[in-house]
Image (tube, helix red, strand yellow):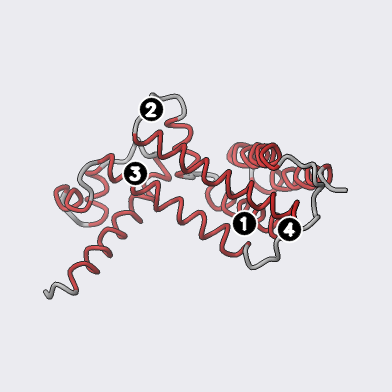
Amino acid sequence: MSPATTPSKGAATRELILDHAYELARQDGLEGLSIGALALGVGMSKSGVFAHFGSREELQLALLDATTKRFLDFVIRPAVQQPRGLKRLRAILEGWSEWIRIHYNGCVLISAVVEYDGREDGPLRTRVKEQQSGWRNEVVRAIRQTIDVGDLRADTDPVQLAFELYAVMLGLHHDASLFGFDETHQRTWAAIDRLLASYQH
């Protein structure tokens, strides 16, 4: 094996491990992530997994980062094809809704919030807060752009509106799990439409 091929193979193996860890964490959360089950699932030894991630915590942190990228690629990339303003903001919310439709029975990011919100500060809780703050900031930025192009009133508080939209989307995630997605999705968008209208001229 040449030195040139070693890094790419190592990166591919790391991605394979993270992909399988993602599916396990969707079912059992980050705290339920078992190195033994993960190693078995990818056909490696535990030491082979640890060769790519020096500890279980390092694996959990890498999985949070990988899932954040997966989420942003799913939601933001299509949305930025829309012009800045209400069309882009709604596209972000539509992508977010679709993510919830796919993941309402197991979202690593939402599970992580539930798992770590009441714990003492540590690397995992810090990373969860960073992920959530980063996503909130993306929504705030889209709202500010919507204000700048005149699609929302100039006196709109972007941080407040982002909080309100986030609360509605959490309601979708929560109720979809208990009562089914379709009706909850309709009610969610009725709430979003009314909320956005309240900030328009």
- Residue topped by disc 3: 61
Q: Tell me what residue is drawn at x 32 percent, y 41 percent.
A: 33
Residue 64: horizontal and vertical position, in percent? Answer: 40, 46
Q: Which mark is residue 121?
A: 2
Q: Within 10 Å of the Cα at label 4, are there few (<14), some (14-19), or many (20+) other Cα atoms?
A: some
Return the residue found at the far right: 201
Task: Find the distance from the CA under tag 3 to the CA under tag 2.
Answer: 14 Å
- Residue type pointed to by label 3: Leu
Task: Find the distance from the CA under tag 4 to the CA under tag 1.
Answer: 16 Å
Residue 159: horizontal and vertical position, in percent? Answer: 66, 39
**Helix, strand or loop for disc 4:** loop
- Residue topped by disc 4: 85
Task: Find the distance from the CA under tag 2 to the CA under tag 4.
Answer: 37 Å
- Residue type pointed to by label 4: Gly
Q: Earlier in the sequence, mark 1 or mark 2?
A: 1
**Helix, strand or loop for disc 3:** helix
Q: Are marks 3 and 2 in contact (CB under 8 Å)?
A: no
Query: Comparing marks 4 and 1, which lies closer to the viewer?
Result: 4
Q: Quadrant of residue 192?
A: top right
Q: Is residue 124 left or right of residue 86?
A: left
Q: Tell me what residue is drawn at x 48 percent, y 32 percent.
A: 114
Judge by depth and name the residue closer to the eye, 34 or 158.
Answer: 158
Q: Earlier in the sequence, mark 2 or mark 4?
A: 4
Residue 179: horizontal and vertical position, in percent? Answer: 64, 38
- Residue topped by disc 1: 95
**Helix, strand or loop for disc 2:** loop
